[in-house]
Image (spheres, rainbow, N blue to C red):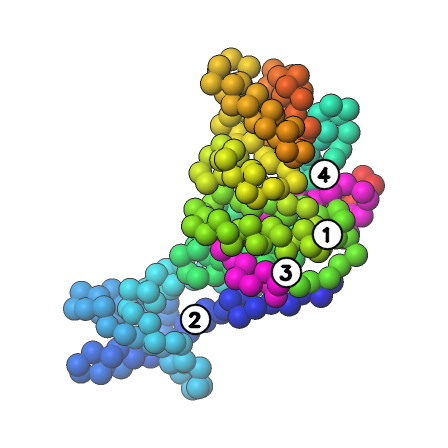
Amino acid sequence: MIWHPCAECTTTIRFIETGSLHIQSPESEVVSYDSFEQLEQLLESTLRLADFPVSCRATGSRLVTPVLAASVLLEQVRHRQTIDFIQNGVMTSHLQPIFNIQDNTLFANEALLRAADQNVSMSPGLLFSTASKMGLHSRLDQRAREEAIRATHLIGGTAKTFINFLPSTIYNPEYCLRHTFEIVETLVFEVVETEKIEDVNHLKHVFEQYKKQGIQVALDDVGAGFSTLDMLSLLQPDYIKIDRDFISHCDTVAENEAFLRKARHLTKEMGIQILAEGIERQEELDLCRELGFDFGQGYLLGRPAPYSEFAKAQ
């Protein structure tokens, strides 16, 4: 595999545990510290006066951090463990099966980013929210894609792999997506609903670039956020994944069933395959099958597991 990272993917936040804090106040203060806890206290004291520009310089070396507002550096220091994990932590992919619910065969797996060490408590939600706040979302998104592609390559087989991506991290699709691998025909990239998409035309362009490379695309969480049924004709995805809120108790909630029927009708007309997310009850599976849904995913069908377990099963 060859990966071509852009500048945003290689953004690095550095921390200096022992050094001096340089405060660009009228007095131009320089205060030494010997722990992160001390540095936090110094930044908190600085903020009581004003949000001065600050930087850190390491003791006995030329290492220096960029000049930032004191409030920004304080947030970075407070989140340093999560930031360090995003940048340097060992990650892996867990896979959750996606079944063809019409013939009960395995169709694909969705790759979900996890810490490789089970003793490391780093939830995906914490990682992505911290990455977004700290400007590391492109870095984390790239690492997630790399791990998903690696897992797909190692397990082999013919099942597809659904890989999540954030459209805002793809600044220049022709460059950011310029990677080569032999398993392109088994990949499906799905846009995830963790951010509001302001530029729909940009997302359309990203989809078009993936398709040019022979990669299929999916629209996640349809029915929630920006992923409405009205977007289907514009984006022309290969697959849509119906938000779990509409799957939950769809057999007893009339509004949910009506939405599923409408979605199935539209996708059938457009030649788009449809997947039900979050299936947890047999009754939900039965209704989705009856409505003609192509695929299903959820705890009833299979929970996420390390990709190494899937490789053994091949």
Real-space Cα separation, disc 1 to disc 2, in angstroms: 41 Å
Which quarter of the figure has residue 234?
A: top right
**Residue bearing the label numbered 3:** 177
**Location of mark 2 (residue):** 15
Q: Which residue is mark 1?
A: 214
Q: Nearer the viewer, mark 4 or mark 1?
A: 1
The CA distance from mark 4 to mark 2 is 41 Å
Residue range (magenta): 153-176
What residue type is disc 4 on?
A: Ala
- Residue at figure coordinates x 71%, y 66% from the top left: 2
Q: Please, what is the three-letter code of the amino acid marked with disc 3?
A: Leu
SS state under label 1: loop
Disc with the residue nearer the chain's start (2 vs 3): 2
Q: Is residue 235 visible?
A: yes
Badge 2 density bin: few <14, some 14–19, many ≥20, Cα 10 Å = some
Quarter occupied by the N terminus = bottom right
Instruction: Name the kind of residue labelled 1 in the image.
Output: Gly
Find out whether residue 71 is within the magenta segment: no
Is there any visible trace of residue 126 in the rendered image? Answer: no
Mark 4 lies on a secondary structure that is strand
- Locate residue 133, reporting x and y percent: 40, 57
Query: Mark 4 sits on what residue?
Result: 108
- The type of residue carrying mark 2 is Phe
Residues under numbered marks 4 and 2 in contact, where contact means CB atoms less than 8 Å apart: no
Task: Give the secondary structure at mark 3.
Answer: loop
| Location of residue 150 with respect to 55 vertically, above or below | above
Q: Earlier in the sequence, mark 4 or mark 1?
A: 4
Q: Are marks 2 and 3 in contact (CB under 8 Å)?
A: no
Relative to 70, residue 20 above or below: below
Where is residue 163? Give x, y as percent. 63, 47
Relative placement, left or right, of 177 versus 251 is right
Nearer to me, 94 or 205? 205
